[in-house]
Image (cartoon, helix red, strand yellow):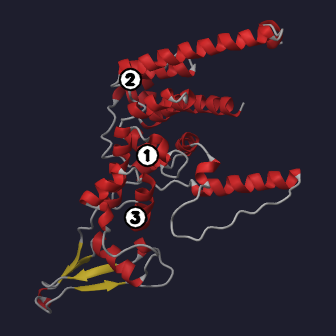
Amino acid sequence: MLSHHISKLLRRSYSRTILNYRGFASTNVEPDPMERDPASFFFNKEIQECLQTLTTLDYNKVFRTRKDGHKQELPQFKFLTDEQLEEARKEAEHRAKKYLQMPPVVKQRVEPSELLCEDPALQSHDTAKYVFTDITYGLKDKQRSIVVRELDGTLRHASWKERDRMIQIFLPKPERELQKPKMFEGEYFKDLLNRNEYEFILDRACTQFEPDDPDYQAVTQEVYEHINAKSHFDVLRSTRHFGPMVFHLVWTSNIDNLLYEMIETNRIKDAALLIRLYYMVHPTTKSAVEQCENTDDVNFVMHYVRLESLKKDKIQKLLQSYKELQQEREIVAEGIKQAHGISSETDKT
């Protein structure tokens, strides 16, 4: 019942999204993804709901034992009433959702280029540059004024690298290093990818970098592309990084491998939801403008595959196998009902 309600809700939201953009689609070409701000899409309420649904909630995975250096707590066994058990379940769900809070997806930051002043009288005033940092208590990091006096007397805003370094010196954040860790470079990084340490890399990137840092975005995107190439999607499923990975694949119009994996693992509702999410981000695509008349999930997915997919033949064969398997299951289910003396007409009433 819940999955049916969610599917129905998302179909309505998908229809509203397409109607809102239909006039735009008829006269405009979709802008380059590099020029658009992903944050305006990522933080959209409906898109957030889609990403959370696709992430799924597997308590065994969310609350699994982690080797992160923290002392493990011993399990506790309690006798509970039905009311207390229900309250404990709600508390567990609340904690799980906190663990699955997705890192933000935002546009890459731009280096400041504005000069504050030029003072030739201070040229060669010293053999080193001066950095002035506002360390006022309670300010957010991006609100702090950090300026640099160059050797030629020029006063300018600090670059982002300089800002990050100064803030970490004066207001250090736990577990963040002054220099970019070696694990994000060269052979060290490739070794972690080859060992499928995706969640460890992404967790460490969230600790070390800000979401708009070019290094953070380069690291996360390389991890997502590696997972996509290897179809290791299930490694991140039920983690806080699954949603941003899905959003990246949707944003870059590269969902075919994930779509195939969802169909192959009988997640046809997730596959249909993934395509609806794709239409929210790319409302001017051909399959989005030419709406599928049949709202059945399989036909809806087939509609997208026929008009958009670069792996059309491969996915269509898989969908056909899925449909045949479903038909066989329905025949078996009907046979079981008849064996128990339950006719289809009785079942309907």
- Furthest residue toward bottom: 125
The percent position of residue 92, horizontal first and vertical second, equals 70, 55
Residue topped by disc 2: 286
> Marks 2/3: CA distance?
36 Å
Residue topped by disc 3: 210
Which quadrant of the figure contains the N terminus? top right
Q: Secondary structure at mark 2?
A: helix
Give the residue displayed 18% in from the left and 82% down from the top: 150
> Marks 2/1: CA distance?
24 Å
Give the residue displayed 58% in from the left and 41% down from the top: 53
The percent position of residue 95, horizontal first and vertical second, equals 66, 58
Q: Is residue 245 visible?
A: yes
User: Which mark is nearer the camera, 2 or 3?
Assistant: 3
Residue topped by disc 1: 245
Would residue 145 be found to the left or right of residue 55 on screen? Answer: left
Which quadrant of the figure contains the C terminus? top right
